[in-house]
Amino acid sequence: METYGAKVHPSPSDFTDFGKKLLKENPKNTGSLGIAISEAIETCVKTANTKYALGSVANHVMLHQTVIGQEVVKQLEMIDVEPDYMVACVGGGSNFAGFSFPMLGQKIKGKVQTEFLAAEPVCVPSLTSGEYRYDFGDTAGMTPLFKMYTLGHDFMPSAIHAGGLRYHGMAPTVSLAVKLKLVRPVAIEQKETFSAGLMFARTEGIIPAPESTHAIRAAIDLALEAKKKNEKKTIVFNLSGHGLLDMSGYASYLGGKMENSC
Ligand SMILES: Cc1ncc(COP(=O)(O)O)c(C=O)c1O
């Protein structure tokens, strides 16, 4: 971002009252998406001519991202393939929803039998261990309430590398799909995700983002299970981003210094 002229301040920052309060309580606060959202909203409210565009969680964001899943449906139609599984990682839920909701619509209409897996970190288990209830979308409690799976808006995630998955809640639409058992959540350990990321980089030539490695791990595990049972399965997963912004994560994994850390 700074390459293109932005100035980036790590959150929690001393630019907002909420950030200052948190830093006073704990100068080593490792931040979270919930805290960053609170700081962004506070800055927006206090600064003239400033707007805040939500990047995940809210329903319109899920809808916007479905351009991905509509293309997936078309591409699979073109090769006449019905996937057995569709897999994506989940932070706030947008890449998962965008990727899978169009096919999930087909499933609800009885046109396909596809199973959907949402991969989250063991350290931030909103879908696998959270409560389904109303909660704030940010840590300070400035947003409207969302009905979702949540670990509580003051949940402090441990400092795993997949920063984009360090969020206490989950999109209401994704949460409802899990509640209705249309989507199966799986929780994955950090080192397992990096081993999958490394395998993917070596075989495909793309270094995946730590967030995306959760989807890759879940897809590999499904493939291994099918192999064990001597079954043929079609597994489609979403590669949500590249990992060039977290070389230190790969360095830590390759240097044997990484821990599962929660
Ligand atoms: C590469 C990548 N994948 C996934 C996510 C998770 O977000 P969402 O669940 O909204 O797709 C993020 C969030 O920052 C991300 O950077």
Image: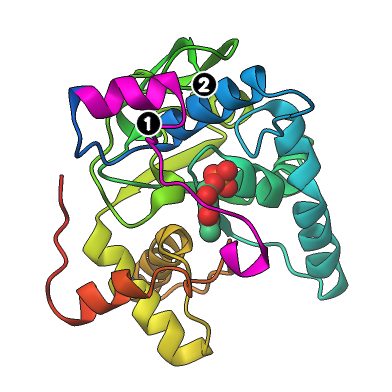
Quadrant (top left, top right, bottom left, bottom right) of the N terminus: bottom right
Q: Is residue 38 above or below residue 136?
A: below
Q: Which residue is mark 1?
A: 126
Q: What is the secondary structure assignment of the residue under circle 2?
A: loop
Q: Quadrant of residue 108?
A: top right
- Which residue is at 34% across, 25% downward? 20
Residue 127 falls left or right of residue 177: left
Q: Position of residue 79 (x, y in %)?
A: 81, 76
Q: Which residue is mark 2?
A: 137
Amino acid type at mark 2: Gly
- Which residue is at 46% across, 48% downward? 164
* Residue 113 highlighted magenta (yes or no): no
Q: Position of residue 247 (x, y in %)?
A: 37, 75
Q: Is residue 96 above or below residue 251?
A: above
Provide the residue span drawn in magenta. 1-24
Q: Is residue 214 above or below residue 43?
A: below
Quick one: 73 or 207, which is closer to the camera? Answer: 207
Residue 114 falls left or right of residue 23: right
- Which residue is at 38% across, 41% downward? 166
Q: Marks 2/1: CA distance?
A: 13 Å
Q: Position of residue 38 (x, y in %)?
A: 49, 24
Residue 24 falls left or right of residue 60: left
Q: Is residue 130 above or below residue 100?
A: above
Amino acid type at mark 1: Ser
